[in-house]
Image: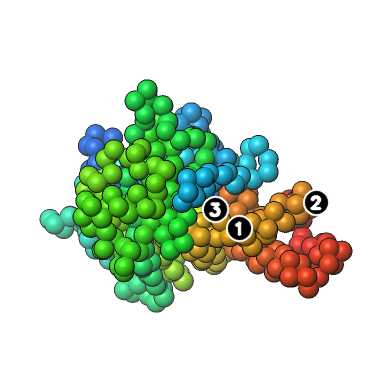
Amino acid sequence: MNKKHKITIIGSGLAGPLMASYLSQRGYEVNIYEKRQDMRIHKQSAGRSINLALSKRGIDSLKDIGLYDKVRSKMLPMAGRMIHDIDGKQHMQRYGQKNNEVIYSISRSFLNKVLIDHAESKPNVQIFFNQKLIEVELNKSKLIFNEERKIVPFEILFGSDGSASPVRNSMEEISSINFRKIPLDHGYKEINMPPDLAGNYRMNPNALHIWPRGNFMLIALPNTDHSFTCTLFFPMLGELSFSSIDSENKIIEFFKMQFPDIIEMLPNLVEDYKNNPTGKLATVYCDKWNYKGKALIFGDAAHAIVPFFGQGMNASFQDCKVIDQMIEKYEGDWNEVFSNFTKNHKPNGHAIANMALENYIEMRGLVNDEGYIKKRELELKLELEFPNRFLPRYSMVSFHSLPYSEVYKRGEIQSKLMDEFLAGKINQQELKGKILKKLETIL
Ligand SMILES: Cc1cc2nc3c(=O)[nH]c(=O)nc-3n(C[C@H](O)[C@H](O)[C@H](O)COP(=O)(O)OP(=O)(O)OC[C@H]3O[C@@H](n4cnc5c(N)ncnc54)[C@H](O)[C@@H]3O)c2cc1C
C-alpha cells in the first residue's frame, strides 16, 4: 500500500463532495476548494436547473457513502413521461414495465447541501469556500487562488470543477488532451408553476411532463413544495427562438399557441421568462482525463453533456464509484488508478454524451411519432420475452449500472433488429434467433 497522499479537490458542486466522502472512507485526508460562497449560508441561484432527475447510478453512489436514507424522503418518483399534445390531450408513457422502474425528481440545492454537509462531517475532510482557482502549475504541484494569487501546494489533484474546468485547461496546457466543447444551438429557461390556491400540485406529480413541439419542447418536474419547475428548451436564434420571443405580447402569444393547457397555471410567466437567465448547453468530449498520476478530472469537467437523458449528475456520481473501485484495485497507486480510469471509463463518457443528444430528438418530437410508438411497443414485448437479454435502452441507462458504452452498443444492435423486423426484412422466428445470438444475458 502506498503512502496515503493528501488529496485536493477543486469544486464543491455535486460530484466533488461525493468523491471526498468516498476518499475519506478510505482514510485519505481531503481538502476541497470552491469558488462560490457556502450555499448553506448564502442563498444563491442554483445556476443550473432547480431540480434534477436522479436514477440508479446516482442512487448507488449515495448508498455507498451512507447518504441515501437522508435523501430518499425528498425524492419524488416519476413513473413516466406525461405527453401534452397541442390540443390539451395527455397520455402517459411509462419509463419501465416494473413498478420500481421509476426515476426521481430531487432539488439540486438540497442535494448539494447534504452532500457538502456529509463530506464536511468527516474528520478528514475540509472545505474552503470563496476560493477561485485561477491557475495550476501542475509540474510544480502548485495551485493559485483568487485575485491575491494565494499559492497552495498539492500532492494529488482531483478536478470536479464543471464544464469550464480550469484543472482541465491546465492539463491541456502541458499535455495533449484533445478536448472539444461543442455548444448546442438550443438553450433553456426555467419557469415556475406554483401550487394551486389550495396548495396542491396543478398536474400529476408522478410524472415528468413533456410538451413535444418538434423543434423545441417544454418539460416540467415536480418539487416537494407542490410546485413544478418548467423548462423551455428552445433555439437560441431563428424565427421561433429566445432571440425572437422577446416581449410580453410575444411571450404570451407563444405560450397560448404552443402550451394552451397550462398558460393559466403560470401566473409569473412573463416575469420568469424575462428575469430568469437563458442557460447555454454544450457537450464536452475530452480524450484524456488524467495528467500522469498527479491530476484527474471527472464529472462535467471530463464529460459535460446536454441534459436530455437526465444523466449528467448520475454519470458524475458513477465516476466517483468507479474511481473508488480502482483505488481499491490498484491499492492507491495513482498512476494506475488515473490511467485506468481514463482508459476504461472515457468511452462511457462519450457514449452517454451521444445518447443525451439523441434523446433530445426523441423527447421533442419522436415520442408522438407512429413509428416510434410501434418500435417502443415491440421493445417492451421483447423485454418481457427476453428479460435480462433484451432491455430497452432507456431502461439500461436509468435502471441498470451497465457501462454506458455497452448500453450504446446493445441499443444499436436492438434498434437495428427491430427496424429489420418492422420493415418485414426478417420474421418473428429470425428476430428471436438473432436476439439469442447477438445479445448476451445481462447479469
Ligand atoms: C438544465 C440542466 C438540467 C440538468 N438536469 C439533470 C438531470 O435531470 N439529471 C442529471 O443527472 N443531471 C442533470 N444535469 C447535469 C448536472 O447538473 C451535472 O452533470 C452535474 O452538476 C455535474 O456535477 P459536477 O460536480 O461535475 O459539476 P458542477 O455541479 O457544475 O460543480 C462544479 C463546481 O466547481 C466549482 N468551480 C468551477 N470553477 C471553479 C474554480 N475556478 N475554482 C473553484 N471552484 C470552481 C463551481 O462553482 C461548482 O460548484 C442538468 C444540467 C443542466 C444544465
Tag 2 residue: 385
Instruction: Give the mark nearer the N terminus: 1 vs 3.
Output: 3
Give coordinates of residue 128: x percent, y percent: 26, 44
The percent position of residue 183, horizontal first and vertical second, equals 36, 68
Colour treatment of the image: rainbow
The amino acid beneath tag 3 is: Val
Comparing labels 1 and 2, the label whose residue is closer to the camera: 2
| Disc 3 target residue | 322
Q: Which residue is more in the foreground, 355 or 4?
A: 355
Q: Which residue is mark 1?
A: 403
Q: Secondary structure at mark 2?
A: helix
Q: Say if 120 sits above or below 47 in the image.
A: above
Mark 3 closeness class: few <14, some 14–19, many ≥20 residues within 10 Å:
some
Asked if residue 236 shows in the view, the reply is yes
- Observer-nearest of 233 and 125: 233
Q: Going by the image, does 288 lie left or right of 428?
A: left
Q: Earlier in the sequence, mark 1 or mark 2?
A: 2
